[in-house]
């Protein structure tokens, strides 16, 4: 087996079509987004006899707590050779260690989208990885399969969710609009800021969201949904549509209109859009672990589960330590985790 960089968008995207599970965080456009945000990236492929077996997008992250390489929801490995995970991951790791040395990174972080099994956890353990003190992306996601009719999807929902969607559809003062404009992104961002104040989390910058929209709309892979009640925007969502999946990536709402079911109608419209595009699943993104009743995401989790679906649980985020400087990152992230209530 050999490893080399991939510079062909069609080759990259075509390979990922045959991988499952997967998310847009390994897509070609996520790499382009990262570059436009000023980050260095490497698109790596493992080959055998000129056949691409695995792909891995790595991004260099420079933060106050340290510099590191991050692999988000990867590597992706061709389904037929899943039994070669250890060998393939070791090849990627050797290359990433070489890059990390050149870039003066103190560790390598991998956020796998591999199923959380003892076997998959053991692959990372044998290679010297340790559990990261904090996860960057959700390690438990809620997935709705779209292989049913709209009627069947509605009946698969929690009774209350189905009722609220129907009430929203009957409300003449409530409408949902779809957009790809920067003007509407600004409207969403204003709403997003209100949500940040309410839930006290670290927000993305407007430039971060604007750059995502800019990159993904070039391939018609993103939509902004805005819920308007009596012409006032009270709820919103940003959905990424990539390959055969749809991903609820950002959401926001106004508390004073919590009794108006705009958020329910937005999700239903986003799901219907996914079906129109031929998506086979809709990802509600992260949910709280079942054994954490006081988790900050508990309310949002109840909302997401109401639409029906299933849980996907991934291998915990892993760090490969390269320098003693890692201890600074470890302490900062551990304190951050405690402060945010994720323990």
Image: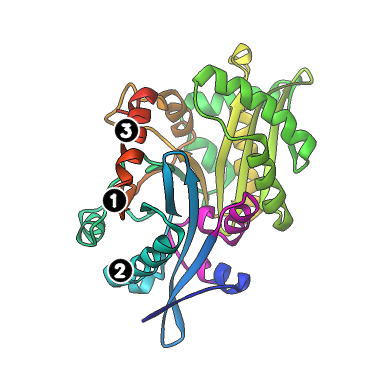
Q: Position of residue 159 (x, y in %)?
A: 48, 26
Look at discs 2 and 1 and give the one toward the viewer: 2
Q: Where does label 2 land, which residue?
A: 90
Residue 324 in percent (x, y) is at 28, 48
Q: Which residues are magenta?
A: 15-40
- Residue 23 visible in the displayed image: no
Q: Residue at x 20, y 54 (%)?
A: 118
Q: Which residue is mark 1?
A: 116
Horizontal arrangement in the rendering, residue 162 relative to residue 335 (left or right): right
When asked about the image quadrant of residue 125, the answer is bottom left
Q: Residue 334 — which label?
A: 3
In this view of the protein, which residue sits in the foreground, 155 or 294? 294
How many residues crowd around disc 2 within 10 Å: few (fewer than 14), some, or many (20 or more)?
A: some
Q: Residue at x 46, y 59 (%)?
A: 103
Q: Is residue 185 left or right of residue 260?
A: right
Q: Residue drawn at (72%, 49%), measured in percent from left and top?
A: 214
Closer to the chain start, of discs 2 and 1, is 2
Q: Pointers 3 and 2 in contact (CB under 8 A)? A: no
Q: Tell whether position 19 is magenta.
A: yes
Corner quadrant of residue 27? bottom right
Relative to 52, residue 300 above or below: above
């Amino acid at each position: 087996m050999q490893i080399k960089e991939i510079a062909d968008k069609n080759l990259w995207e075509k390979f990922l079509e045959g991988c499952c599970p997967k998310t847009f965080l390994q897509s070609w456009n996520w790499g382009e987004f990262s570059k436009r945000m000023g980050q260095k990236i490497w698109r790596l492929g493992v080959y055998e006899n000129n056949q691409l077996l695995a792909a891995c997008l790595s991004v260099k992250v420079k933060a106050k707590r340290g510099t590191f390489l991050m692999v988000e929801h990867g590597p992706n490995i061709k389904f037929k050779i899943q039994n070669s995970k250890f060998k393939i991951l070791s090849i990627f790791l050797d290359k990433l260690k070489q890059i990390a040395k050149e870039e003066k990174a103190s560790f390598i972080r991998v956020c796998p989208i591999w199923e959380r099994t003892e076997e998959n956890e053991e692959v990372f353990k044998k290679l010297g990885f340790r559990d990261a003190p904090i996860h960057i992306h959700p390690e438990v996601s809620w997935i709705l399969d779209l292989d049913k009719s709209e009627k069947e999807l509605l009946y698969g929902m929690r009774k209350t969710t189905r009722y609220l969607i129907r009430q929203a559809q009957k409300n003449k003062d409530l409408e949902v609009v779809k957009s790809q404009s920067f003007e509407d992104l600004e409207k969403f961002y204003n709403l997003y800021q209100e949500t940040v104040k309410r839930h006290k989390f670290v927000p993305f910058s407007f430039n971060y969201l604007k750059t995502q929209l800019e990159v993904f709309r070039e391939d018609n892979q993103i939509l902004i949904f805005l819920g308007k009640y009596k012409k006032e925007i009270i709820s919103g969502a940003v959905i990424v549509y990539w390959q055969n999946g749809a991903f609820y990536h950002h959401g926001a709402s106004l508390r004073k209109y919590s009794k108006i079911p705009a958020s329910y109608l937005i999700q239903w419209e986003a799901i219907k859009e996914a079906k129109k595009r031929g998506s086979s699943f809709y990802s509600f993104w992260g949910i709280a672990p079942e054994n954490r009743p006081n988790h900050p995401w508990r309310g949002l989790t109840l909302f997401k589960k109401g639409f029906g679906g299933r849980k996907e649980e991934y291998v915990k985020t892993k760090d490969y330590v390269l320098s003693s400087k890692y201890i600074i990152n470890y302490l900062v992230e551990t304190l951050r985790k405690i402060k945010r209530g994720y323990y």
